[in-house]
Amino acid sequence: MFPLVEFPELVEHYAPFFRGVFSAEAFIEFERYISGLIVSENKTVEGINRLFVVESRNQSSLNRWLTQSPFRLEELNRARLEVLESLSGTRMKPKGVLSADDTLLIHYGQEFEQIAKLYDHVTDTYVWAHDLVTLHYSDDDTDYPVLFQLWKPVELEKLEAGLRAAQVPLRANKEALKESDPRKWRGYLMGVWQRQQKKHPDLRELYDSKLIILQNLLQQWVTIHPKANLPVTFDNWFTQPAFCRFVDQTLHLAYVGTLAETDKINLKSGQETLGNFAERLKQEHLNALQHGGKAVFQKITIPFKGGRETYYSYCNTHHLHNFGKQRLVINYRQADLSDNPTFFNSNRLTWQAAGITRIRRHRWPVEVYHEEGKAEGLDQYQLRDFDAIQRHVAMVAVVYSLLRAAQHDPDLRNRLQRQLKVQLEGTPSFWRRATQAQSLWRLGLFLSSGLAQGQTLRELMTPLIHAMCRA
């Protein structure tokens, strides 16, 4: 970590897009915070505040900006998307795809507002974390978060009171679980709430599940972009019948979901799991190849991020249990079908395997964003206040988006290449390193200029040392 004597060129270049979001004083704090998120390896408020020789301030001013400044996250997000729409490479395109995912922002300890003990499938353990739900845009040139929201755990007392107010019966023999096993009591109430929503629609207002959060994000997106009509893709957790019906019947959007081998297909011969169905098709395919018959799985190629990918696909319309009539795609990556199959479903019954597979392939970038976003500080906050945590998450989205914009901005790239004498092409993580290098170059120019004007090295270094040692 080295001190900043000026805001990075990238920040100065894009900051004017955000000037209207903040007061004059808050705008400087905004520049300080996003500069620190890019340059510092320590993404906490303390770590960021230590960086600055220019605009050096007490750490409390940055804390107050995150917790008390009156700027609106909706306006910040609008300005962020305006940056991306200003460049042809990051502008949304007709072939773009919306994808949905969530990620755990893991912390140690329970001192953070709205933190919960959640299951982490990576470590197969329960961890203390916030859960971030993201609606992400992707095309072959770029990708970035569009809308996002942190999930809040259910308030059990509010949920119970709401169920009773709606005169939903609760089993008396479950009451003891409140004291003996709170986790089971929570599971019981959540199950009742889930099952009773069709009969009592007002119950939905009691709690925003991840599915409801995603529905709200999609509804916001459709309201803002009524003519865009981009398809939506999501993983198995979000591929639930009620959510798919919402996307299809309420939003009138195309979707590509992800099914598990245990999901069921309704055939004339009876109901069968997708895993067994795929195995039967595989044997038919291999037998056909052996005896000169017609292949069941057809070779397809799809474009993705400038390359081509090959799959062996089965595609047909079937009745899927609880989903109704759907387009079903079963994919293998190996020509001999020796790998594990993947299963996708879509509400567009005339689409073919290549189109459905291409759309589903664009779900991967949201996972990459969550990982790269964590490198930019997505889960590195030490803030306790939930609103401040949401602002921090929004600032990381700003930083990621600016790094994405830089990839497609010839004016900025040319200026930085002249300074650094380095060819600038690469991922957001590369552009973060390039911004760090440019800040280091400015520090070198600062020292060189001071020495040329007759200042001693001690005189030049003293404010830098004080900045780095500041409490």
Image (cartoon, grey):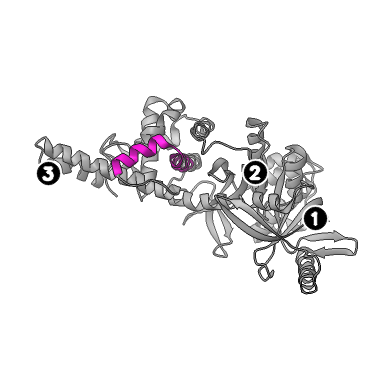
Up-down: is 463 above or below 283? above
Q: Secondary structure at mark 3?
A: helix
Span colored in magenta: 395-420
**Magenta portion: prevailing SS class:** helix
Residue 366: x and y in percent read 56, 49
Measuring 61% from the left and 42% from the top, which residue is drawn there? 96
Report, in whole angstroms, how far the alpha carbon at label 2 lies from the one at label 3: 56 Å
Is 417 in the magenta? yes
Residues at marks 1 and 2, CA–CA distance in whole angstroms? 28 Å
Q: From the image, tell me which residue sits under label 2.
A: 214
Query: First in sequence: mark 1 or mark 2?
Result: 2
The residue shown at (65%, 51%) is 358
What label sits on residue 247 in the rendered view?
Answer: none
291 to 306, vertically: above or below: below
The amino acid beneath tag 3 is Arg
Tell me: 150 left or right of 246: left
Q: Residue at x 77, y 68 (%)?
A: 285
Is residue 350 in view from this perspective?
yes
Q: Is residue 140 above or below residue 287?
A: above
Q: Residue at x 54, y 42 (%)?
A: 145
Q: CA distance from mark 3 to mark 1?
A: 75 Å
* Front-most of residues 162 and 99: 99
In the picture of the structure, the residue carrying the numbered disc 3 is 458
- Name the quadrant of the C terminus: top left
Quarter holding residue 225: top right
Disc on res. 316? 1
- At label 1, the amino acid type is Asn
Image position, residue 422 (x, y; %) = 33, 47
Residue closest to the eye, 244 or 14: 14
